[in-house]
Amino acid sequence: MSGATPPPAVTVGAAPLVGEGFVLRPWRPGDEDALIRHADDRGVWRNLTDHFPHPYTREAAYLWIASQLEAEQKGALCNLAIEVGGEACGGIGIQPFTDLACKGAEIGYWLGRSHWGAGIATRALRLLTAHVFSTTDRERLQATVLAWNPASCRVAEKAGYQCEGTLRNSIFKDGELIDSYLYARIRADG
Ligand SMILES: CC(C)(COP(=O)(O)OP(=O)(O)OC[C@H]1O[C@@H](n2cnc3c(N)ncnc32)[C@H](O)[C@@H]1OP(=O)(O)O)[C@@H](O)C(=O)NCCC(=O)NCCS
């Protein structure tokens, strides 16, 4: 059996996306201090993949930014910083699926605690969702939200994502086995 043809690289592009009170733009050298300040937070890490470091060290920050420069050079930039007041305070990005799911992608986001509750994540999710649907071939974006994270459920709902179900015992995080919710928005949702 021959292998599947790899899909073309997906990129969200390097041009800044300007939202109300924030800008989405690529991670750049010089963002390290702000990244560490906002990301080195157990309350952020607890709701994200274990690939997100904790503690968030300087080395982790350098590695992350180097990985983003490399992705940009390959035309496969999929993550953007959420810049508020001139500094990178959070991140948002997609992870394109392949094979049978090649028309979809996972979308993820986080924001530094000092900016929570101001609607920024919701507006950033709306903006990147619209951008991905208008500039890529992706038909479906989905977010996996841990069951103990009602704020993110609310963000997804406010950005037009529908909860498609509960994935029981799907997550082992921070020593606990918990459910997650699968949220999705498809192009046809408008
Ligand atoms: C989840 C997160 C992105 C939200 O960012 P934010 O900018 O504060 O989100 P918004 O202000 O746009 O919206 C938050 C909503 O959640 C609601 N909310 C906050 N805490 C809540 C709680 N404990 N229970 C229910 N709703 C809650 C807010 O009231 C608001 O809804 P409203 O506008 O209807 O009042 C941010 O808290 C974060 O980065 N957390 C850590 C990482 C994370 O969870 N990422 C998402 C992984 S799926």
Image (cartoon, grey):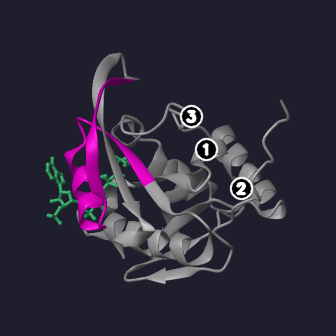
Q: Residue at x 45, y 76 (%)?
A: 85
State the image coordinates of residue 106 (x, y, percent, origin top left): 50, 50
What kind of residue is marked 2? Answer: Gln
Query: Dot 3, crowdedness within 10 Å: few (<14), some or many (≥20)?
Result: few
SS class, disc 1: helix
Question: Camera-side residue: 162 or 111?
Answer: 162
Query: Is 170 included in the stretch rendered in magenta?
Result: yes
Q: Indicate whether residue 154 is drawn in magenta.
A: yes
Gap between marks 3 and 1, in whole Å?
24 Å
Q: Please provide percent x and percent y for residue 32.
A: 63, 54
CA separation, marks 2 and 1? Answer: 26 Å
* 147 with respect to 144 (left or right): left
Asked whether, in this view, residue 57 is left or right of residue 158, the answer is right
Q: In the image, what residue occupies the spot 35% across and 70% down?
A: 189
Give the mark nearest the N terminus, 2 or 3: 3
Q: Which residue is mark 2?
A: 68
Q: Quadrant of the C terminus?
A: bottom left
Eye-nearest disc, 2 or 1: 1
Numbered tag placed on residue 51 in the rendering? 3
Residue at 69% across, 74% down: 14
* Residue 154 visible in rendering: yes
**Residue at the extreme front:** 1
The image quarter in which residue 148 lies? top left
Q: Can you see residue 84? A: no
Percent x, y for residue 179?
Answer: 27, 28
SS category of the residue bearing label 3 = loop
In depth, the one of 165 and 81 nearer the eye is 165
Magenta residues (range): 142-171
Amino acid under disc 1: Leu
Give the labeled residue for mark 1. 100
